[in-house]
Image: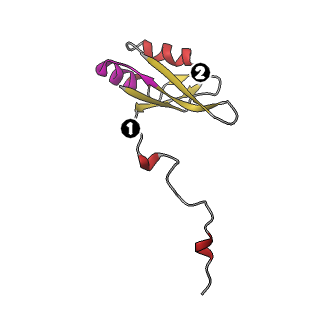
Amino acid sequence: MNIYVANLGYSTSEDQVRDAFAAHGEVTSVKLIMDQVSGRPRGFGFVEMPNTSEAETAIEELNNSRLDSQVIVVNEARPKTQNNSFSSNRGGGYSRSNDRRY
């Protein structure tokens, strides 16, 4: 199961996240998301656990718990879709066609 972890402190390491989840079962991977421009952590990441019941226990036990002085949010990751990607056009761009005067 892929698990979403949010509100991580900027100094929280992948090892700290791994240790927190490993207390509830096997962890196959931990990936903290980094800002592409600054190279700093963005405060969230993903943990993969192969056993669903262990993953569900980890989610239940770790959601709203403290990790590295931060209260973290933990839940099952949702699959990436077209609607939650930045590639969709949500405005913000300037189009000359919207500036026509008749």
Which disc, if any, is residue 79? 1
Residues packed near mark 2 inside 10 Å, few (<14), some (14 to 19) or many (20 plus)? some
Q: Which residues are magenta?
A: 47-60
Horizontally, residue 22 falls left or right of residue 100, namely left
Residues packed near mark 1 inside 10 Å, few (<14), some (14 to 19) or many (20 plus)? few
Residue 97 coordinates in the image, percent (x, y): 58, 73
Q: Quadrant of the N terminus?
A: top left
Q: Which residue corresponds to mark 2?
A: 68
Residue farthest to the bottom, as pictured: 102
Residue at x 58%, y 32% (from the top left corner): 43
Which disc, if any, is residue 54? none
Magenta includes 56?
A: yes
Residue 79 coordinates in the image, percent (x, y): 38, 38
Residue at x 58%, y 27% (from the top left corner): 70
Which amino acid type is shown beneath numbered disc 1?
Answer: Pro
Residue at x 68%, y 36% (from the top left corner): 37
Q: Nearer the viewer, residue 101 or 51?
A: 101
**Total tally of numbered discs in the picture:** 2
Which amino acid type is shown beneath numbered disc 2?
Answer: Asp
Residue 82 coordinates in the image, percent (x, y): 42, 48
Horizontally, residue 52 falls left or right of residue 62, namely left
Q: Earlier in the sequence, mark 1 or mark 2?
A: 2
Q: Main secondary structure of the magenta part?
A: helix
Badge 1 vs badge 2, beta-carbon distance below 8 Å: no
Report which quarter residue 53 is drawn in: top left
Magenta includes 95?
A: no
Question: Is 82 placed above or below 19 here?
Answer: below
Question: Is 16 placed above or below 102 here?
Answer: above
Residue at x 52%, y 19% (from the top left corner): 17
Assign a secondary structure to mark 2: loop
Question: Is 14 placed above or below 96 here?
Answer: above
